[in-house]
Amino acid sequence: MSDVKILIVDDEPVALKNLGHVLTKEGYQVTSAKSGKQALAYLEKQEFALVLTDLQMPQVDGNQVLQRVKGTYPKTEVIMITGFSTIDSAVESLKAGAYHYIAKPFKLDQVRKVVREAIQKYQLVTEIEQLRRQVNRTEAQPQLITHNRQMKSLLDMAQQIAATDTNVVISGESGTGKELLAKYIHNCSPRHAETMLSINCGAFSEELLTNELFGHKKGAFTGADSDKKGLVEMADGGTLFLDEITEMPLSMQVKFLRVLQEQEVMQVGGTKPVQVNVRFLAATNRDLDQEVKAGHFRQDLFYRINVVSLKILPLSERKDDIPLLVQFFLDRYNASMHKQVEQVAPEVIETLERYDFPGNVRELENIIERGVALANSSTLGLGEIPDDLRSLDMQTFRKTVGKYASMEEVEKSYIEWILKETGFNKTEAAKALGIDRVSLWRKIKKLYIEE
């Protein structure tokens, strides 16, 4: 909060001092103005995230300060401070663009809460504006919306390797944006002017996958009435994205390995290989190392395709991105549905931040799309989000073992998760597991669970 600037305007010295002291202790940069005229002078020199102004002041009153703020800095939020006798005037100020009003004598907890929510709105609007400028600069460049430190480091690495032709495997849970990251790498690469094609390796049988990737010659099989180029050949000069690569059959992996090694493809029914120049990006929602150990993915292909590995965090581990993503999707669906849902209620954000999102960013997008579709006012409230989110603090167990793990491995992973969620409170953990403390202690010893 140390870089958040707040201007306080009040002609009562005691009120001005007390309010400044409270907000300075909260970590804000506070500037105090003892009159509306002095406030206008400060506003000539700099922008503030928030202005708290007394409504009734001589010469230049709070409404005049509000008008100047909104005329010069539309994003800056304004909170009106008013006495009981002028509450009607404060309500009129809300219609003129004020964020909120606080009646004297005010409670400090109320001030802190309203200020925090106003600052959050200012920051969200500012970040979305920056994002829009970035989108306009890069035109169709796909955007991974984040201000999470780990995700920014991931994007920095992605941008760095984009300049090379290195093969990359992107891992992460379903709905985290693996294909979006692949498009980001392609668009940052020297190949950006060429095409990027995608295929889901789990969506086809082996025969169809072979035909889709490598193509065929006329007469190669019944129904092959003409030559057909495969995706590898069609992506020549560009990028081919192989989604869910661990779904590729082992026999198919052998054929694909040759394409990677030789940069050539043999069409079905063909007699001469075709040279290609393709950069390969792959994605999986599984642990590729575990798939190799289990014999479901060839080790030689693993080393050839997994030159660089990028792992996208699940949304449950980057909850600081939720407000930014919410605003982004709000803008998207306002535009597509021709609606004007201008903001999301703070209690909605709080509810979303308590949820673990097993469906990740895709699930959050669906929630906001639904909310915009149902909203009948300018604010998306709790009534527009699913009932189960409103009534439950939902948390999701994410299995940290391989696809074909034993019951003992899954049990160990689940108990470790429960212990972590309960802060290693064994009484609470045993209750959640439906067993007694002694049974839990035995399982901890048997499964070698570290406390």
Image (cartoon, rainbow, N blue to C red):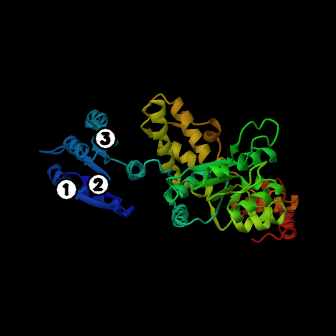
Q: In the rendered view, does 304 fall on the left or right side of 63?
A: right
The residue to which callout 3 is attached is: 98
The residue to which callout 2 is attached is: 48
Between residues 399 and 141, which one lies in front from this camera angle? Answer: 141
The structure residue drawn at horizontal position 47% and vertical position 45%, both measured from the top left corner, is: 328
* Discs 3/2, front: 2
- Answer yes or no: is residue 120 visible: no
Instruction: Give the residue type at disc 1.
Output: Tyr
Q: Could you say which disc has been placed on residue 51 in the image?
A: none
Q: Position of residue 121 (x, y in %)?
A: 40, 47
Q: Is residue 375 above or below residue 442?
A: above
Separation of residues labelled 2 and 1 (CA atoms): 9 Å
Q: Is residue 367 above or below residue 275?
A: above
Q: In the rendered view, does 269 fall on the left or right side of 179?
A: right
Between residues 33 and 274, which one lies in front from this camera angle? Answer: 274
**Dots 2, 1 in contact, CB < 8 A:** yes
Q: Which part of the image, by quadrant, shows the N terminus?
A: bottom left
Furthest residue in direction left, as rendered: 59
- Secondary element at image label 1: helix
Separation of residues labelled 3 and 2 (CA atoms): 14 Å
Separation of residues labelled 3 and 1 (CA atoms): 19 Å
- Answer yes or no: is residue 296 visible: yes
Q: Mark 1 Cα within 10 Å, few/some/many (few <14, many 20+)?
A: some
First in sequence, mark 2 or 1: give its number.
1
The residue to which callout 1 is attached is: 42
First in sequence, mark 3 or 1: give its number.
1
Q: Position of residue 34 (x, y in %)?
A: 18, 55
The structure residue drawn at horizontal position 53% and vertical position 50%, both measured from the top left corner, is: 322
- Secondary element at image label 3: loop
